[in-house]
Every structure is written in structure tokens, then in C-alpha cells.
């Protein structure tokens, strides 16, 4: 089992080193990729550090083994830095990094000086509490982030963070295995930790590589200045005239700011109208018009367009987004809808 554990450790070392270099060289999303580069590089160093545990002198020294596990605690803060870079990039300041990392560094320094095992236990308890608080905070932030996206963008491909909930679940599993390994170390548990870490960060790297960072999202959350007088929504007639199939097809990346500009109003008034008067968000509102046109195509027995062509002509940026939106409205796929329409026609 030890040989298998050593193999998993080596695989983790190489994965994190190669992944960190990949994100370091990516030209897009420079700030986000730079943060991810440092986080992955740090995790790679942690795994390289574990090679020291193969040395008999280190393995037989409780002080040395505990010191290495104390350094592992820093990874909890590193994960938080990655999530902040994705969800709250403007909040990831030098002050934030120092204030979140400093307690872990101090715990490690105090243990180096005193060798008191209780400091390591206190460090572990702090890491657990930090992780729990961070988990609830980032779950809330994911909901906030997705809500802002839906209120401001008609196409969410590669900018939504729905996948992050599954990644957080894997992160919790990884941390549980790691905490267990801190107090009950063994080759099988080490292997489980390396394996869960590889799976977790493979998922994160896969989606992060495709992720487009919306740098202005936090600015979007700030309402624009409006007149003191209540809006009469004078732009509504123009809005209904503007949203033609041709307009939607030509503007697959339409945003609420762009539409408000075309209507001669501002983003706050338009969002207020959609949210309060129509009880919807910008994403669902625009896609409802796109779906109406898609229904016309699917109901026409003479229409020879493929689903990909229908998605493109109605303004959907991808077939997957089209299918997901269509299923949400009709509780069936576009293909099933077309078959039902064909049967009713005959």
C-alpha cells in the first residue's frame, strides 16, 4: 500500500506543477489565473514536502511530522484565496491575504518554538472553524454571483459558477480526509487524501480553464443614479418593438446595460421594471422571447432547421443553453416538443 501511496503523491506533485505552469502562461483573465497559479504552486510544494515523510528520521520524529502537518493547514486559506479571486476579485487585497494567512503562520511558528502538541490541536480546531465559516460564506456568494449574472446577462455560458457547488462538496470531502489523516495517519488514508485532492483540483482546473471572469460584476451591483421622480417606464413600448427575432439573433451576448442604452434609459430602471413589474430577471426575460421564436420553428412541420441552427437563429449561444432553457419552460426537450407538435398536427 505504501508504494501505491508514493505513486499517488508523485502523481499529485506532477499534476499541480503542470497545472500551475499552464495557468501562469494563459493570457486571458490574468489576475485570476495568476492567483490560481500561486495556489496550485503552493499545493504542489505541500505535496513535494510530503516526500520528506518517506525518510525514516522524519517519520519517526513526532515533532517533525506534526510540523509538516501544521504547514498543511495553510492550504485552507489558499483555497479561500482562489474562491475570492473568482467571486469577489476586488476584495482579494494584500490586506485580506495577510490577515487570513497570518494566523496559520503564527500557529506554525509557535509550534516550532515550543513543540507543544496542544498548539497543533488548536491550529486544527481553528482550521475547521475557518473552513465551516468560509463554506457558508462562499455558498452565499455563489448565489449572489449567479443572481447578478442573471440580472445583467442574457448568455451565461462560461461565466456562471454553478459547477462551484459540486467543487465545494469535493473540497469538504478532501478536508475531512485530511483532518482524519492529521490524527490517524496511515498509508491508506494518505492515498485517499492524495486521490481526493487530485479529483478536486482536476475539476477546478477544468472549469477554471473555461471560465470567463466578469471583472465589472461588482460595479454592476451598484445602482446607477436615477431621478427622484418615480419612473413611468416610458421605454416599455420601444422594448416590445425592439425585441424582434432578428435583433435577438444578432445579439447573442446582449447585456442589460446595452439594452438600456438602446432604450434611452439606464440599467437600474430597466432592471426595476423586469424584477418588480414582470417578476423576472434579465436572463429569463430575454430567453423567453428567444424560446417563443424557437417554438415557432419547432411547430412548423415544413421547418428543416436542425436544433443547432434553431438555437443559433434564436440567439442562443450554444445548443446546451438552448436545451436547458427549453426544458425549464416546457419540461421536455426541443426534440420531444417537435415530435408532440407533429403528432398533434396529424
Image: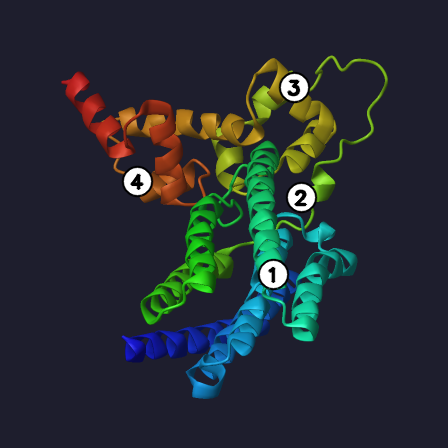
Q: Residues within 10 Å of mark 3 (few under 14, many from 20)?
A: many
- Any part of residue 264 in sight: no
Residue under pointer 3: 273
The circle drawn on residue 217 is: 2
- Which secondary structure lies at badge 3? helix
Residue under pointer 4: 307
Which of pointers 4 and 3 lies earlier in the amino acid sequence? 3
Q: Nearer the viewer, residue 138 or 123?
A: 123
302 relative position to 190: left or right: left
x, y (%) of residue 226?
A: 82, 24
**Residue drawn at point x = 49 percent, y = 61 percent:** 209
Please, which colouring scheme is shown?
A: rainbow
Please name which of the two marks, 2 or 1, marks the residue nearer to the observer. 1
| Location of residue 155 with respect to 104 vertically, above or below | above
Which of pointers 4 and 1 lies earlier in the amino acid sequence? 1
If the image is split into quadrants, where does the C terminus sit?
A: top left
x, y (%) of residue 200?
A: 42, 59
x, y (%) of residue 37?
A: 58, 69
Which of pointers 3 and 1 lies earlier in the amino acid sequence? 1
Please name which of the two marks, 4 or 1, marks the residue nearer to the observer. 1
Amino acid at each position: 500500500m505504501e508504494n501505491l501511496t508514493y505513486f499517488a503523491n508523485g502523481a499529485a506533485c506532477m499534476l499541480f506543477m503542470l497545472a500551475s505552469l499552464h495557468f501562469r502562461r494563459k493570457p486571458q483573465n490574468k489576475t485570476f489565473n495568476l492567483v490560481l497559479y500561486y495556489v496550485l504552486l503552493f499545493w504542489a510544494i505541500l505535496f513535494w514536502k510530503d516526500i520528506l515523510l518517506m525518510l525514516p528520521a522524519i517519520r519517526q520524529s513526532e515533532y517533525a511530522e506534526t510540523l509538516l502537518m501544521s504547514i498543511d493547514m495553510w492550504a485552507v486559506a489558499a483555497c479561500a484565496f482562489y474562491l475570492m479571486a473568482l467571486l469577489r476579485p476586488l476584495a482579494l487585497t494584500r490586506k485580506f491575504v495577510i490577515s487570513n494567512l497570518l494566523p496559520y503562520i503564527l500557529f506554525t511558528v509557535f509550534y516550532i518554538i515550543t513543540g507543544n502538541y496542544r498548539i497543533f490541536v488548536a491550529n486544527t480546531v481553528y482550521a475547521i472553524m475557518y473552513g465551516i465559516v468560509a463554506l457558508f460564506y462562499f455558498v452565499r456568494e455563489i448565489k449572489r454571483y449567479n443572481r447578478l449574472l442573471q440580472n445583467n446577462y442574457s448568455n451565461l455560458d462560461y461565466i456562471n459558477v454553478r459547477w462551484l457547488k459540486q467543487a465545494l462538496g469535493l473540497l469538504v470531502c478532501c478536508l475531512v480526509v485530511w483532518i482524519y489523516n492529521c490524527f490517524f495517519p496511515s498509508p491508506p488514508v494518505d492515498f485517499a487524501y492524495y486521490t481526493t485532492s487530485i479529483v478536486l483540483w482536476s475539476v477546478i482546473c477544468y472549469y477554471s480553464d473555461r471560465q470567463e471572469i466578469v471583472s465589472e460584476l461588482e460595479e454592476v451591483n451598484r445602482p446607477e443614479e436615477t431621478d427622484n421622480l418615480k419612473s413611468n417606464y416610458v421605454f416599455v413600448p420601444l422594448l416590445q418593438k425592439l425585441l424582434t427575432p432578428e435583433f435577438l439573433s444578432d445579439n447573442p451576448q446582449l447585456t442589460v446595460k446595452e439594452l438600456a442604452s438602446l432604450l434611452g434609459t439606464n440599467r437600474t430602471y430597466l432592471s426595476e421594471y423586469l424584477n418588480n413589474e414582470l417578476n423576472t430577471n434579465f436572463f429569463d426575460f430575454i430567453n423567453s422571447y428567444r424560446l417563443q421564436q424557437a417554438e415557432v420553428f419547432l411547430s412548423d412541420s415544413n421547418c428543416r432547421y436542425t436544433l443547432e441552427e434553431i438555437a443559433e437563429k434564436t440567439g442562443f449561444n450554444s445548443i446546451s443553453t438552448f436545451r436547458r432553457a427549453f426544458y425549464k419552460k416546457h419540461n421536455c426537450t426541443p426534440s420531444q416538443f417537435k415530435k408532440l407538435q407533429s403528432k398533434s398536427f396529424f
